[in-house]
Amino acid sequence: MVLAMQRSQSRPYFIALALAGMAASLASLGGCDPSDETRAGQPIPATARGERPFRHVLIISVDGLRPDALEPPFLASLPSFARLLRGPHTLDARTDADITVTLPNHTGMLTGRPFDGPNGHGWKLNDDPPGRAQGGTLHAMKGAYVSSVFDVAHDAGLSTSITAGKTKFWLFEQSYGPSHGAPDPLPPDHGRAKIDFFTYARETEGIARVVADRLRDAAARRIGTLDFVHFAAPDAAGHAHDWILAPDSRYFSALLEVDAALGTMLAAIDTTPGLAMRTAIVLTTDHGGGAPAKTHTDVMSPLNFRIPLLVWEGGDGESRDLYEFHQDRARPTRETRVARDANPQPLRNTDAGNLALELLGLPAIPGSTRGLTVVPIGTPVPAVSASPDKSLVPAP
Ligand SMILES: [Zn+2]
């Protein structure tokens, strides 16, 4: 079953050019993309502050993904995951320090905030959210507007979407829909609805097809995109049969299913002009699993809090340590839980949104944290193109 909701049909053509550092200076360009020529060689990690942002970025969450599934011998059966590991990555990232369940951790990924503490997003509920009128938005819970990765991308002129395998992600549609998303502070006005498409799909391959079609369509129309993709199958298998990593386990068979779905999306990227080498992926998870058995609620267990975080920048890049590009962070030993206020911080799934924006050449989410640093609220996101460039509308 696929439930799709579509709001806006078109976005201005845009190009973002990050000139230097996290300040991400932006420039509008008229008719050509200078990165077309320079992109021909090996991709350079944007995490190394590259000057060539991507036009399409996917944030993929594989719900309940154990990091050791991405190591030998299991990796040999997961060719798409193996390909995504050819880029900066770590298997020693961390979940939120204080909670290892689904919706609070995904809220962290998309807002860049921890769950708890003065700068926390504060959303603890892990079921379908109550209605908007009953307080079912992140802003009502926080008592203040909570910006997301969608705010920054959409205000800059990108098309945005969620394709998810759980209905509880409707929380984000409720929080960032036309009635509760923040006004776009700078012209042109891209509206208050920060998420253009919301799709709930139960089947793993169905999710991949929705995303692949969306990417092909955006490339044909020369629209930049920021998409969040969620695969639920490994978590469902873990809850039903436990997080057992073995070639014949139900959990591993769910990972094989996700690997095939990733393959579908990668094939679309590889074979579509405008997507190949212009599309980057940030992949992580909300938690591991297995502590206690068949769940992932024990925040003190490495089975739950130790997670992968990877950045794929197209082609077949070099496998690198993501920590190399984040000198303000420190890799914990495999068994170490790191408190929210520890200094330095590890890389966390909370970094996913800002990594995606960095790849797009956009500034970080207002109010988010990078390690222990809080990104100031109040700096509007400049749109990257003042108006659609008619000369770039594809021929019919
Ligand atoms: Zn989960």
Image (spheres, rainbow, N blue to C red):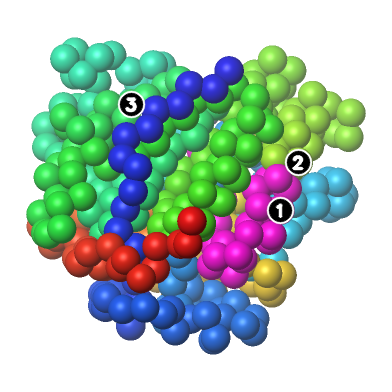
Nearer the observer: mark 3 or 2; the answer is 2
Q: Position of residue 68 (x, y in %)?
A: 73, 46
Is any atom of residue 127 visible in this view?
A: yes
Pointer 2 local density, CA inside 10 Å: few below 14, some 14–19, many at least 20 = some
Residue 260: mark: 2
Above or below for 165 versus 37: above
- Residue type, label 2: Ala
- 100 vs 386, left or right, is right
- 243 vs 288, left or right, is right
Pointer 1 local density, CA inside 10 Å: few below 14, some 14–19, many at least 20 = some
Pointer 3 local density, CA inside 10 Å: few below 14, some 14–19, many at least 20 = many
Question: In the image, is residue 278 part of the stretch drawn in magenta?
Answer: yes
Secondary structure under tag 2 reads helix
Residue identifier under label 3 = 171
Above or below for 2 versus 353: above
- Of pointers 3 and 2, the one earlier in the residue sequence: 3
Residue 267: mark: 1
Q: Which residues are magenta?
A: 262-286
Secondary structure under tag 3 reads helix
- Residue type, label 1: Ala
- Residue type, label 3: Leu
Q: Position of residue 355 (x, y in %)?
A: 43, 61
Contact between marks 3 and 2 (CB within 8 A): the answer is no
At 55% from the left and 86% from the top, the residue drawn is: 37
- Of pointers 3 and 1, the one earlier in the residue sequence: 3
